[in-house]
Image (spheres, grey):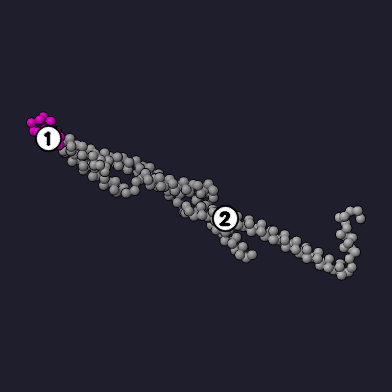
């Protein structure tokens, strides 16, 4: 009797039959309430975890979808980059030669300067011993103009896009694929498979949520 923890037991035992029945009903309802409360807490916890999973799935899917990786793409880009290395050297050499001869936008290249030199010497008159050089310089300027035209035509055949810029674009694309592989797979194909698995998990999670 001195232990208050046992008082309720004695009081409950002293209840009349009707009270005992009510007590049994109460205990049954309380157990049901406790179970419902436990289930509710579990449901809330599961719902929070599902929400976190969905957010993660959506983030990862968006990151992959933004790059849009394609199967076999990486190998093709690497091969193209290798061929561009020689292409870049040829293009750069021809472009430099063309600028040197034509002078670019200002037009004050070797052809212009050679013509100018020929005109200066020609202006000295036939009596000057240097006068014959003017004809040679004019001829040289004409030949350089022809060469510049051939180089310009070759550059136009190689395409309007600068191979250096094209190479940079390929490198940026390869880097984007590499960043995806660091997170989602060792190959582009594995990254694509991972994306499909994310989509499956997301759809399944949403289906289960709606089912609840």
Asked if residue 46 lies left or right of residue 96, the reply is right
According to the picture, the residue beneath numbered tag 1 turns out to be: 123
- Above-or-below relation of 163 to 42: above
Asked if residue 53 lies left or right of residue 167, the reply is right
**Residue in view at x 24 percent, y 39 percent:** 109
Q: Main secondary structure of the magenta part?
A: loop
Tag 2 secondary structure: helix
List x then y, in percent, for residue 26: 81, 65
Occupied quadrant, residue 129: top left
Q: Nearer the viewer, residue 95 or 7?
A: 7
Sort mark 2 into few (<14), some (14-19) or many (20+) by Cα contacts within 10 Å: few
Camera sees residue 136 = no
According to the picture, the residue beneath numbered tag 2 turns out to be: 55
**Residue in view at x 89 percent, y 63 percent:** 13
Asked if residue 1 lies left or right of residue 193, the reply is right
Magenta region: which residues? Answer: 119-132
Mark 1 and mark 2: Cα distance apart in space: 82 Å
Specify the quadrant that holds the C terminus: bottom right
Magenta residue check for 70: no
- Residue furthest out toward the top: 129
List x then y, in percent, for residue 200: 56, 59
């Amino acid at each position: 009797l001195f232990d208050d923890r046992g008082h309720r037991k004695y009081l409950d035992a002293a209840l009349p039959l009707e009270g005992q029945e009510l007590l049994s009903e109460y205990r049954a309802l309380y157990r049901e309430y406790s179970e419902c409360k436990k289930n509710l807490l579990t449901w809330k916890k599961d719902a929070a975890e599902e929400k976190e999973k969905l957010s993660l799935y959506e983030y990862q899917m968006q990151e992959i979808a933004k790059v849009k990786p394609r199967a076999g793409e990486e190998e093709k880009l690497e091969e193209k980059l290798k061929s561009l290395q020689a292409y870049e050297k040829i293009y750069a050499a021809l472009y430099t030669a063309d600028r040197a001869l034509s002078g670019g936008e200002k037009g004050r290249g070797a052809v212009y300067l050679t013509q100018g030199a020929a005109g200066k010497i020609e202006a000295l008159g036939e009596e000057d011993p240097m006068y014959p050089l003017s004809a040679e310089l004019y001829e040289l300027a004409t030949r350089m103009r022809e060469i510049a035209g051939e180089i310009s035509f070759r550059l136009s055949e190689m395409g309007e896009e600068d191979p250096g810029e094209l190479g940079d674009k390929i490198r940026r694309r390869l880097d984007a694929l590499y960043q995806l592989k660091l997170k989602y797979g060792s190959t582009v194909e594995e990254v694509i498979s991972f994306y499909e698995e994310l989509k499956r998990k997301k759809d399944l999670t949403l289906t289960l949520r709606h089912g609840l």
